[in-house]
Amino acid sequence: MTGHCLFVLGGARSGKSRYAQQRAEAVEGSAIFVATAEAYDDEMRDRIARHQADRDHRWRTVDAPTALPAAIGSLNARGNVVLVDCLTLWLSNLLLANADLAAAGEQLVQSIAGFEGQLTLVANEVGLGIVPDNALARRFRDEAGRLNQSIATLADEVMLVTAGLPLRLK
């Protein structure tokens, strides 16, 4: 990797997205937000609108609910400041589409490894709670844990955000 990769983990409503955005905004360059969420209901539409309102005019948005590796590849340039929020929603989208998660994860790792700009990735840490009561939820938790480990290994810097407080892990 010739650029810099920051990986920000945290639980729901932990402040991870706000922290990641602040870090990205502190870097000069073309600010690009890669969104993986899809608005299937009013609550999600409101959530997306709040996130959009938090970003100023310098941000350009690219939607990549499933084609995240390709989106990162298309934005690969020195001077680009790319914020991906979030890997967990991307993984959910792939899981629900019955995609090959291992292949998609490998493609993602390759796109990150070759990125030349500033890349910030956000993901949920879902492995700290109780063991889910159904097979799909357990598979999701396991896949998210594997993905997070792969990205953390590759990233230059890993931060865990809890109650709005960042903790450097790497």
Image (spheres, grey):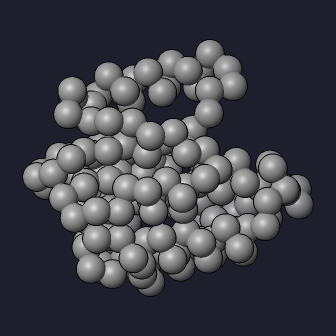
- Residue 143: image location, x then y, percent: 70, 68
Say whether residue 38 is left or right of residue 76: right
| Residue at left offset 35%, top offset 63% | 76
Q: Nearer the viewer, residue 27 or 130?
A: 27
| Residue at left offset 32%, top offset 53% | 82
- Residue 87: image location, x then y, percent: 54, 56
Location of residue 8 (image quadrant):
bottom left
In this picture, is 170 found above or below 5? below
- Residue 153: image location, x then y, percent: 44, 83
Q: Is residue 14 something one can see in this rendering? A: no
Q: Is residue 111 something one can see in this rendering? A: yes
| Quadrant in which the C terminus appears | bottom left
Q: Nearer the viewer, residue 144 or 93?
A: 93
| Quadrant in which the N terminus appears | bottom left
Location of residue 117 (image quadrant):
bottom left
| Residue at left offset 32%, top offset 36% | 60
In this picture, is 88 found above or below 50? below
User: How many callouts does the rendering have?
Assistant: 0
Q: Which residue is most to the right?
A: 135
Say whether residue 22 is left or right of residue 73: left
| Residue at left offset 77%, top offset 55% | 95
In this picture, is 34 found above or below 146? above
- Residue 92: image location, x then y, percent: 69, 51
